[in-house]
Image (cartoon, rainbow, N blue to C red):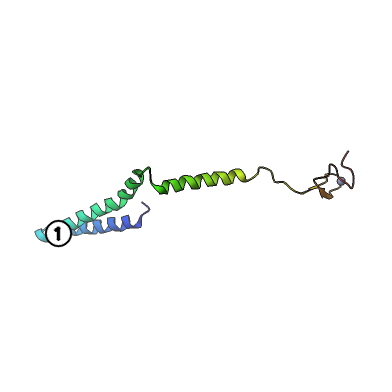
Amino acid sequence: MKNPRVIQLAAISVVFAILWIATWSIPFVSESFAAFAFVFVLATLWTAFVPGVKRLRRDPYDLGRLQEVHEREELSKLNEEVPDTLEFDSVVCRCCMSVYSNQLPTCPRCGGCG
Ligand SMILES: [Zn+2]
């Protein structure tokens, strides 16, 4: 459980349950603690499970979901736009290591490796 609220509510439930058992011999006090424990157990269960159930039962026409689809498409488009190989204006000659324009067919200094 990631929700700290659930842990707090569960702890309060346990405290009331302990008070319920501790005051077992005093009828009215004991019953009051039992009622509080029951209420907090319900609150714990509500806090723990209702958000998950709401997430499962999402409205198919929710605009938030449309936004999610849009964002996913934008992300995949961005991934497509990145080229596999980067293009450079200049290249390095394998033979003499001089840098020249990639517009030239061979190295102007040494004429390439032949
Ligand atoms: Zn060269």
Q: Position of residue 36 (x, y in %)?
A: 19, 58
In the image shown, does 59 or 26 lie closer to the viewer? 59
In the image shown, does 57 or 28 lie closer to the viewer? 57
Q: Is mark 1 within 8 Å of ligand 1?
A: no
Residue 39 versus residue 61 in the image, above or below: below
The residue lying at 74 percent from left, 48 percent from top is 88
Total count of labels = 1
- Give the amino acid at mark 1: Ser
Residue farthest left in this picture: 27
Q: Can residue 26 be seen at all in this image of the molecule?
A: no
Q: Residues within 10 Å of mark 1 (few under 14, many from 20)?
A: some
The residue lying at 54 percent from left, 46 percent from top is 75
Residue 102 placement, left or right of 37:
right
Q: Position of residue 4 (x, y in %)?
A: 35, 57
The residue lying at 21 percent from left, 58 percent from top is 16
The residue lying at 76 percent from left, 49 percent from top is 89
Q: Can residue 19 be seen at all in this image of the molecule?
A: yes
Residue farthest top in this picture: 114
SS at circle 1? helix
Mark 1, residue position: 32
Residue 9 placement, left or right of 38:
right
Residue 52 versus residue 37 in the image, above or below: above
Q: Quadrant of residue 103?
A: top right
Q: Position of residue 114 (x, y in %)?
A: 88, 38
Q: Position of residue 33 (x, y in %)?
A: 17, 59
